[in-house]
Image (cartoon, helix red, strand yellow):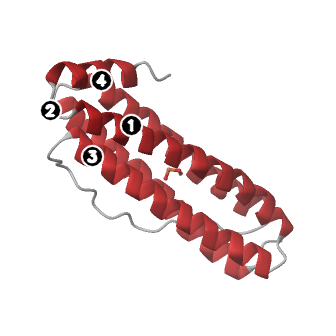
């Protein structure tokens, strides 16, 4: 049975994951409006992944006899100055999420909640990957600068994401 403290914290994390999905979906819409279809596709895939993350917490709470309670989502930003600005924000957002996962892990350790620790270890590893991916894209975009052809190449490369 999940304890109240952990249930509350995981319900909050469902909100963070859904807000991640919402932010990336908003970025997908913005990239689409800028004619950068590859980046739009990448962000759509990222949004779907975030929803899957939210569902992992959802199922964990339910499987342990807890109660999922959804919170309201804040309106995501809708405009960015450049692809670099959008991906830099995505990268910062992933760092924020890593912090939240670490906080949850700290709580699981303090509460001796081994089931939560097992789930959270997956997220700790996932966040390493998420941060590495977004920061590598930021680095490439920085190199591309304002060169149109480099940006279009990046767009094609990111659009190849399954
Ligand atoms: Fe759920 O990993 Fe990104 O936010």
- Which quarter of the rendered picture does the N terminus lie within? bottom right
Tag on residue 78? none
Q: Mark 1 points at which residue?
A: 137
- Residue at mark 4: C-beta within 8 A of ligand 1: no
Nearest to the eye among marks 4 and 2: give it. 2
Q: Mark 3 points at which residue?
A: 86
In the shown orientation, is residue 25 left or right of residue 130?
left
* Label 3 residue SS: helix
Q: For the residues marked 4 and 3, what is the alpha-carbon distance in whole angstroms?
A: 13 Å
The circle on residue 146 is: 2
Query: Does the image show residue 26?
Result: no
Residue 22, given in percent of the width and then of the height, sits at 37, 50
* Vertical relation: 129 (above or below) 156: below
Instruction: Please give left or right for residue 59 compared with residue 141 in the image.
Output: right
Q: How crowded is mark 3: few (under 14 residues within 10 Å), some or many (20 or more)?
A: some
Q: Distance between the residues labelled 4 and 1?
A: 11 Å
Examine the image and state in which quarter residue 7 appears.
bottom right
Residue 117, visible in the rendered structure = yes
Left or right of residue 133, residue 39 in this image:
left
> Is 39 displayed left or right of 152 in the figure?
right
Q: Which of marks 4 and 1 is nearer the N terminus?
A: 1
Q: Which residue is drawn at 27% across and 39% down?
A: 142
Tell me the distance, in whole angstroms, between the alpha carbons under discs 4 and 2.
Answer: 13 Å
Would you name the residue on which mark 4 appears?
155
Are dots 4 and 2 in contact, CB under 8 Å? no
Query: Which of labels 4 and 1 is toward the front?
Result: 1
Image location of residue 141, percent across then percent down: 29, 36
State whether residue 15 is above or below residue 137. below
Spatial separation of the CA atoms under disc 3 and disc 1: 11 Å
Q: In which quarter of the image is residue 93?
A: bottom left
Question: Of the residues under marks 3 and 1, which one precedes in the sequence?
Answer: 3
Going from N to C along the chain, the mark reached first, 4 or 3, is: 3
């Amino acid at each position: 049975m999940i304890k109240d403290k952990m249930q509350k914290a995981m319900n909050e994390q469902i909100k963070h994951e859904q807000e991640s999905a919402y932010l990336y979906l908003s970025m997908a819409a913005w990239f689409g409006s800028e004619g950068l279809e590859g980046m739009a596709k990448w962000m759509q895939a990222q949004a779907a992944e975030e929803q899957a993350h939210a569902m992992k917490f959802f199922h964990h709470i339910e499987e342990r006899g807890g109660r999922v309670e959804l919170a309201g989502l804040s309106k995501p930003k809708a405009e960015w100055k450049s692809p670099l600005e959008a991906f830099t924000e995505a990268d910062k957002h992933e760092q924020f999420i890593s912090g939240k996962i670490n906080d949850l892990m700290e709580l699981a350790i303090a509460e001796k909640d081994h089931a939560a620790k097992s789930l959270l270890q997956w997220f700790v590893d996932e966040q390493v990957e998420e941060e590495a991916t977004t920061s590598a894209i930021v680095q490439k975009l920085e190199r591309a600068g304002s060169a149109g052809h480099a940006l279009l190449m990046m767009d094609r490369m990111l659009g190849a994401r399954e």
